[in-house]
Image (spheres, grey):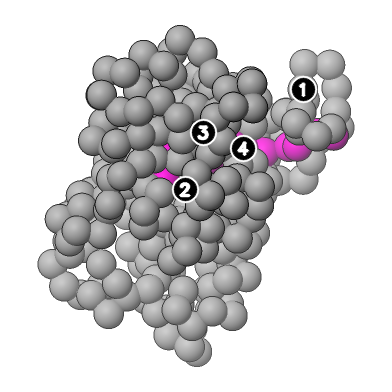
C-alpha cells in the first residue's frame, strides 16, 4: 500500500470505512479524506506529534507522494489534521480503519510477528497549554487534552499515543490515542496483537493485567522487570533509549 497505489484496490476498503467522515458537519475541508487519513497514518507510523506531520508533508517528497499531494499543492495544517483525527475518534472509526490497513500489510507479508514493542509516547495538544491547576486543568479548544507528569520531571499537556509495534518491520499494529493522564497499564493489554512470539515493554506495564494478556496468547513475556536482569533486545533497547523520537520505523532499522 504505497502512494502510487492510491487509485488501486488496496485503499478501497479504507475509503469505504471513511465515508461517514465526508458527511460529518465538523469536517469541512477541501482535502480528500483519504489523503487526510494517510497523513494521520504517517504521523502514527513515524511517532510524530502535532504539528510535525504538517512540517513533514511540507518538505518530504515521500510523505507527499504517499498522502497524494502534488508538489504545487498546499498541505493540511496541524489544526486540520487534529480535527480530522478527532472526528475519526468521535465516529469510532479509528480502530476500524487502522485494522483495515494492518490487514493489508499482513496480507502482503510485511508484518514479521516475531515480537511486539509496546510504548506510549507523549503527543502535544494542538491547543495552547492551559495553566497548571489542581486537578490538571483543561482547554476549551481541546477538552480531551490533559496534563501528565513526565518520568524525568516536568509536565506535558496533550495526549499519549499508546502503540504496539512489530519489532521486525517497525509497523504499528495496534494504537490508541488517549488524554496524557491515562495510565499505560490500563491500555497495555489492548496493544497485544495475539499472534506475536513475544511482547517487549518497560516497567510502566509491570502488573497482572499485562501478564495475563500476554499469557493468554501464548507469547513470551518480555516486560522489563524492576530488577535489571532481563534487558530488552538490542534493537528494542536502542529504540527505547531514543524514546522513539526518530519514529518507530526508523528505530526498527527500516
Instruction: Find numbered disc 1 in the image and state the secondary structure of the residue it sits on.
Output: loop
* Vertical side of 82 occupied by 158: above or below: above
Which is nearer the N-term, disc 2 or disc 4?
Answer: 2
Check whether the beta carbons of the residues at disc 2 and disc 3 lie within 8 A of each other: no
The CA distance from mark 1 to mark 2 is 23 Å
* Side of 131 relative to 71 (left or right): right
Residue of label 4 = 159
Dot 2 crowding, Cα within 10 Å, few <14, some 14–19, many 20+: some
Which is nearer the N-term, disc 1 or disc 4?
Answer: 1
Instruction: Find numbered disc 2 in the image and state the secondary structure of the residue it sits on.
Output: helix
Dot 4 crowding, Cα within 10 Å, few <14, some 14–19, many 20+: many
Which is nearer the N-term, disc 3 or disc 1?
Answer: 1
Residue of label 2 = 85
Residue of label 3 = 201
Image quadrant in which you'd find residue 68: bottom left
Instruction: Find numbered disc 3 in the image and state the secondary structure of the residue it sits on.
Output: strand
Amino acid at each position: 500500500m504505497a502512494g502510487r497505489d492510491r487509485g488501486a484496490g488496496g485503499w478501497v476498503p479504507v475509503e469505504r470505512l471513511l465515508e461517514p467522515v465526508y458527511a460529518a458537519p465538523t469536517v469541512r475541508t477541501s482535502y480528500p479524506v483519504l489523503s487526510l487519513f494517510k497523513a494521520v497514518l504517517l504521523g502514527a507510523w513515524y511517532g510524530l506529534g502535532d504539528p510535525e506531520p504538517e512540517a513533514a508533508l511540507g518538505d518530504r517528497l515521500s510523505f507527499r507522494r504517499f498522502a497524494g499531494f502534488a508538489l504545487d499543492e498546499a498541505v493540511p495544517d496541524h489544526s486540520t489534521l487534529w480535527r480530522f483525527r478527532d472526528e475519526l475518534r468521535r465516529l469510532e472509526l479509528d480502530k476500524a480503519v487502522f485494522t483495515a490497513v494492518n490487514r493489508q500489510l499482513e496480507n502482503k507479508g510485511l508484518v514479521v510477528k516475531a515480537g511486539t514493542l509496546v510504548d506510549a509516547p507523549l503527543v502535544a495538544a494542538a491547543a495552547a497549554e492551559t495553566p497548571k491547576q489542581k486537578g490538571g486543568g483543561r482547554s476549551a479548544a481541546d477538552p480531551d487534552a490533559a496534563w501528565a507528569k513526565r518520568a524525568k520531571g516536568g509536565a506535558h499537556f496533550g495526549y499519549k499515543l499508546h502503540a504496539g509495534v512489530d519489532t521486525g518491520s517497525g509497523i504499528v499494529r495496534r494504537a490508541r490515542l488517549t488524554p496524557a493522564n491515562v495510565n499505560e497499564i490500563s491500555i497495555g493489554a489492548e496493544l497485544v496483537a495475539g499472534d506475536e512470539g513475544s511482547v517487549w515493554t518497560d516497567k510502566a506495564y509491570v502488573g497482572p493485567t499485562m501478564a495475563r494478556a500476554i499469557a493468554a496468547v501464548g507469547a513470551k513475556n518480555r516486560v522489563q522487570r524492576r530488577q535489571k536482569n532481563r534487558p530488552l533486545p538490542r534493537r528494542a533497547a536502542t529504540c527505547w533509549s531514543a524514546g522513539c523520537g526518530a519514529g518507530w520505523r526508523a528505530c526498527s532499522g527500516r
